[in-house]
Amino acid sequence: MNPTIMQVVPVTFTYPVHFTEHLFDPQHSLLDDTLSGNRPASDQVPRVLCVVDDGVLAAFPGLEAQIQAYFAAHPDLCLVAPPLAVPGGERCKSDPKQVERVHEAINTHGVDRHAYVVAVGGGAVLDMVGYAAATAHRGVRLVRVPTTVLSQNDSAVGVKNSVNAFGKKNWLGTFAPPYAVLNDRAFLTTLEDRDWLGGLSEALKVALLKDAAFFGWLETNAAALAARDREAMDYAVYRCAQLHLEHIAGSGDPFERGSSRPLDFGHWAAHKLESLSGYRLRHGEAVAAGVALDCTYAALSGLLPETEWRRILAVLRTLRLAVHVPEMGSGAQDAQDPGSVLSGLNEFREHLGGRLTIPLLTGIASPIEVHEMDHDLLRRAIALLDDVQAQGHVPSPALLDPQGAL
Amino acid sequence: MNPTIMQVVPVTFTYPVHFTEHLFDPQHSLLDDTLSGNRPASDQVPRVLCVVDDGVLAAFPGLEAQIQAYFAAHPDLCLVAPPLAVPGGERCKSDPKQVERVHEAINTHGVDRHAYVVAVGGGAVLDMVGYAAATAHRGVRLVRVPTTVLSQNDSAVGVKNSVNAFGKKNWLGTFAPPYAVLNDRAFLTTLEDRDWLGGLSEALKVALLKDAAFFGWLETNAAALAARDREAMDYAVYRCAQLHLEHIAGSGDPFERGSSRPLDFGHWAAHKLESLSGYRLRHGEAVAAGVALDCTYAALSGLLPETEWRRILAVLRTLRLAVHVPEMGSGAQDAQDPGSVLSGLNEFREHLGGRLTIPLLTGIASPIEVHEMDHDLLRRAIALLDDVQAQGHVPSPALLDPQGAL
Ligand SMILES: NC(=O)c1ccc[n+]([C@@H]2O[C@H](COP(=O)([O-])OP(=O)(O)OC[C@H]3O[C@@H](n4cnc5c(N)ncnc54)[C@H](O)[C@@H]3O)[C@@H](O)[C@H]2O)c1
Ligand SMILES: NC(=O)c1ccc[n+]([C@@H]2O[C@H](COP(=O)([O-])OP(=O)(O)OC[C@H]3O[C@@H](n4cnc5c(N)ncnc54)[C@H](O)[C@@H]3O)[C@@H](O)[C@H]2O)c1
Ligand SMILES: [Zn+2]
Ligand SMILES: [Zn+2]
């Protein structure tokens, strides 16, 4: 007898994503409600470990004291230690010591599966702290407080964490939904321009994939966003987060077991550009260039009408996001060369495993999936974007005409 | 405006658990079917990394060659390297180098999210390799080939992995369902008696919690099992695995986010005894003593009728499983002392987080949950079990009589 049992394990993850301001103001009840809600009466006071991005601490010199004051004013919560500062940006994901430091703090301060790690910072810090929290005791509760546009509208609302290993981005990680996400708009005020603008490339990306009305809104509001209009940013962050959340909930594959990753539009090139730049480029900046490349490729191959290609490039330019970066190289490059952006295609396939699957646009909010990309056409797209970036404007229609110059 | 989006992410994990024999016989198609099934035609040949318990390699000197011969006979699969041997038993979970070795092999040999790690070994090796596989690329496909009774009937059919850290058992880990579980009965023939018998304590445990008929079957077949009857073991493993699988699928909390862990009957003491023994005691042996302790406690406190207590102890004794071990100590001990088994109660609460929740029996297959245990009564139970173990038989009824000696 060779019996087989087919096991089926249904799991539902639920978490709130709040949009607010001045979260750590002692008068504000949201953090307390989040941490103390939903506990049986016999429980002890919830234990909380805070881990904070040192770039955020530098931008808000009073923050550390404010966090301590918040917990002092809320004795129904127990802050187990002064906030733990970790280096902001990609270096916290590349240094294995940082995960160890978070693990040590979780262990030393008795943070158990019903206690909380509150992580405050950009996408990189949230990814690193998220990985540490997900692996300690098979997962302690993680509350994410994202402080950049990119993390508030994309990375922190999702179900992934990661750190770098073997010199490879995101080599280690898990799928682990957070306990809650608390988006505080006040944090965005201190961002450098590049981070304010860079994160908007994910909004453009998801609009192009899913929502023509949101793309129209971005077109209309690109100038206000570039001028750091806060109300415009509120809506851009909210709608982008919402579209990402809807995709994750409804995709049928939130833990990405298939070969296709429909939200990763423009990302095969983006990941490669980030790595070629030694992470000088931020994720959002690389995504802008990657989206420009795949849109131009789609236009050159006749998939995407030229008028729509022009509208997309115009939004990128109004947002001051580069459509060509030095790491993208020239129109003469060899896909076999690991220094070429083109080698990112194969690396993308390898990271996902299985078959290469790339989303391309046939129109605004009208994507299809392709399983190969023509290297010659990609080189033409790169050369064209190099021109656009150098000349500072989108070239005349003839350039895309099959009878035209290219 | 302070909007909130409530995110709901449903995920369903599906995996087969097969019961078979001679899995690596080149004639046997199950492994090939498991690894090559369900792939789009355009995919490459599936890449497979094998990691094997060195205790299993010692017990089956031809195994390494047989694995290589299997893949040589199945060119639709690609074995990326000779099987990687890792130390068997608890030491592989306590040595962080072992996880690193598996990560390095996954990286070096290009094992991606659609490739496989096949782990062959006892529960400890499967836990360690499972942790490495779950964290690489946010999870590569893990096929578990458990080789002990305990892993075939319990640990390998579930959704958890772990390694030890900070001197604490299972401190690091994730919830990560396997791709498939392949239970090969032929592996069990070389187990030491202690491993053949020890794993049966999980069968007794789950019968006591969920299935009076299975408990009756164990009573009837305990002598045959103790005499290493292979057909009896087949059924014990199958039914125990099935009950564990049903629990995980139907519990509503497969990833254990609540405070209660209904399958962990007798486990608060078992975990502590394992650690007090420096892992001289195997998990199954410790579970036997832990189950004996909680049954005796329930009997002394009047929850569990004495006749049923006697039946349970008789099964344990027929299976030659100790109901008292030196690490359990005497009837005089202080729960504050970390060297006392009683301190395991609080450690169990801390590991799970939240409120202490312990399953106790009111009868066979009739558990309830309690939130505290009386230390005096536990000390009396320990003293009684010490006697039972020393005298080699269960004492006369008077011992449990409220008017009696204890
Ligand atoms: N998990 C996911 O699903 C996912 C998705 C997309 C991107 N990511 C990851 O996110 C990371 C990028 O995140 P990011 O774009 O937020 O950049 P970042 O985290 O690298 O932060 C950029 C810089 O801004 C600083 N900073 C953060 N908040 C600030 C504030 N309020 N004021 C001033 N300075 C502040 C940081 O200290 C850092 O120096 C990458 O590692 C990327 O891989 C993850
Ligand atoms: N993940 C879970 O849900 C879960 C549940 C219960 C237990 N566990 C873990 O399982 C581990 C215990 O597993 P175990 O009881 O299988 O013991 P084990 O893995 O420690 O193995 C015991 C010994 O048997 C050897 N061995 C394995 N297979 C053999 C075979 N076929 N022939 C001869 N020798 C063989 C091993 O090399 C080792 O020396 C513990 O670490 C425990 O924490 C995990
Ligand atoms: Zn992105
Ligand atoms: Zn167990």
Image (cartoon, coloured by chain):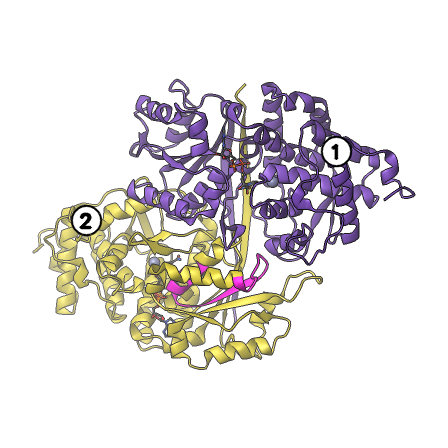
Chain colours: A yellow, B purple
- Residue A301 bears which disc, if any? 2
In x, y percent, where is residue B108?
29, 43
| Both marks 1 and 2 on one chain | no
Q: Is residue A90 visible?
A: no
- Please give left or right for residue B364 compared with residue B279 in the image: right
Q: Residue furthest bottom?
A: A62
Which label sits on residue B313? 1
Q: Position of residue B279 (x, y in %)?
A: 56, 43
Kindly identify the residue that appears in the image at 45 percent across and 58 percent down. A132
The correct choice, above or below, for A10 with respect to B211 in the image is below
Residue A393 drawn in magenta: no
Q: Residue at x 45, y 42 (%)?
A: B92
CA distance separating discs 1 and 2:
76 Å
Q: In this picture, which residue range is highlighted in magenta? A: A108-130
Q: Amino acid at mark 1?
A: Leu
Q: Is mark 2 within 8 Å of ligand 3?
A: no
Q: Is residue B386 above or below residue A337?
A: above
